[in-house]
Image: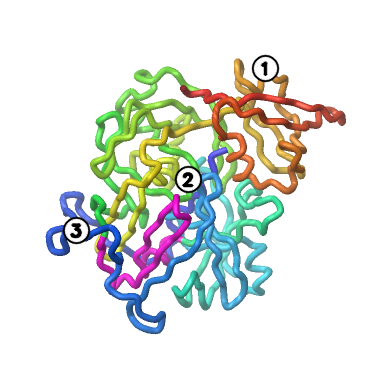
Amino acid sequence: MSGSAKIAYLGMVFAFASVHPAIACDVGARGVHDASSHLFQSSASPESSGFETVIPISVESGEVIVNVTINGRGPFPMMFDTGSVEAVSPETAAALGLEVEGSATARGSGEGTVPIAFTRVLKMRLGNAEWLDQAVPVLPLPRFLTDRGSRPPLAGFVGRELLARFAVRLDYEARTMTLASAQEFRYRGIGTCVSLVFDDKIPVVYAAADGLVGRFEIDTGSTGALVLRHRFVEQHGFGARHPSVLSIKSGGIDGVFETIVTRLDGFSIANAELDRPVAEFPSSGKSGLPGADVDGSIGSQILRQFVITFDYSRHELWFERSAVFGTPTMQWKTGFQAVKADTPGFRVVTVFPNSPAAAAGIRVGDVIIEVDGLPAESIGQAEFTDLMRRPDGTLVSLSIVRDGTTWPVALILKELLP
């Protein structure tokens, strides 16, 4: 499942001015320094105006999870999502004893809506970085987003307020996030600068899919590679040019919807070309992207191929190619999709014909209760996805329940979009 977690503009977040795309990064004033030097001018204490704090992160099927303390309690596992405002789940609000009031709606990737309420958080802390006194939406989240097996469930999101106050360096491979005071920050790496614009508070860059330039949201909350807006697909005939497709189910805060998956010829960003990336787009007239007027979004399977520095105060993103640059993006290797919803196990919702799952006899409605000897209740949704994305040829042993009977199933992973 795509775990793309979207929150449309909720009316209370930090306001950024729109920036014309012709504005370029101010590279000349700073120059380029050796990569081994500090990225920051200062490593002062948190009490001063400038400091650096390095935070360990967990990368779970591409989702970046950080431990955040809220009002001095926790830590709570929260997703770092550039497409989201700070938000907490109702369970987190209750655990903290927060007063919840008001009502509104949030729009998700499937263009459905979910009800939300609001609360006030006095302090969030991530490493040595703090941001204070925020109005925060209380957002009910589906189980396939929050479930982390035997680990504490996802408590909510951090995003725009953090990025408004701090420069953020995200290194997927090193499993670290580095924060610095936005006022004191100066980039000192060897990366390529890309101008950052904002649309409906969403971070947007210009990039090219199959050589066609468009506006693309940077979305660390997406576990995929690319999502294309239906309008962009229709306008440029992507469906006709790439007829080899899969029909899958994708999910957001508003539930599950149908999506087409294919491979493009290439994708260009930050003077880098990625060959044959996987791209998703809605199978119906739905846009597939809430809120902002963009042509697509860039998810973790592409973002992880770079070390990325977010400098919202200067409207800049800096891209450094990571050690895994050039790694092929992937989709599903089993031929089935399964989610945790109404059972402790993973309920199968899709089986592709002529796939390893179909050959193994897996059916829609089967419930997977064991994976490679591990009970399903101990495995989170993201961990389950990672297990199903191991190298081609990997043997996966499952136990499934069908009509009250438990069956052993073995299948061999193989990429379905070669």
In this rendering, is residue 109 above or below 162? above
Secondary structure type for disc 2: loop
Please provide percent x and percent y for residue 232. 33, 33
Query: Is residue 353 among the parts visible in the rendering?
Result: yes
What residue is shown with label 1? 359
Labelled disc at residue 56: none
Coloring basis for residues: rainbow
What residue is shown with label 2? 222
Determine the image quadrant of residue 281.
Answer: top left
Q: Which residues are magenta?
A: 159-188
- Comparing 350 with 135, the one in front is 350
Q: Earlier in the sequence, mark 1 or mark 3?
A: 3
Q: Earlier in the sequence, mark 3 or mark 2?
A: 3
Indicate which label's residue lies in the foreground, 3 or 2: 3
Q: Residues within 10 Å of mark 1 (few under 14, many from 20)?
A: some
Secondary structure type for disc 1: helix
Dot 3 and dot 2 residues touching (CB under 8 Å): no
- Comparing 306 with 242, the one in front is 306
- Comparing 247 with 323, the one in front is 323
What residue is shown with label 3? 32
Give the CA distance from mark 1 to mark 2. Answer: 30 Å
Of the 4 image quadrants, the one containing the N terminus is: top right
Q: Residue at (73%, 48%) from the top-left corner? A: 378
Q: Amino acid at mark 2?
A: Ser
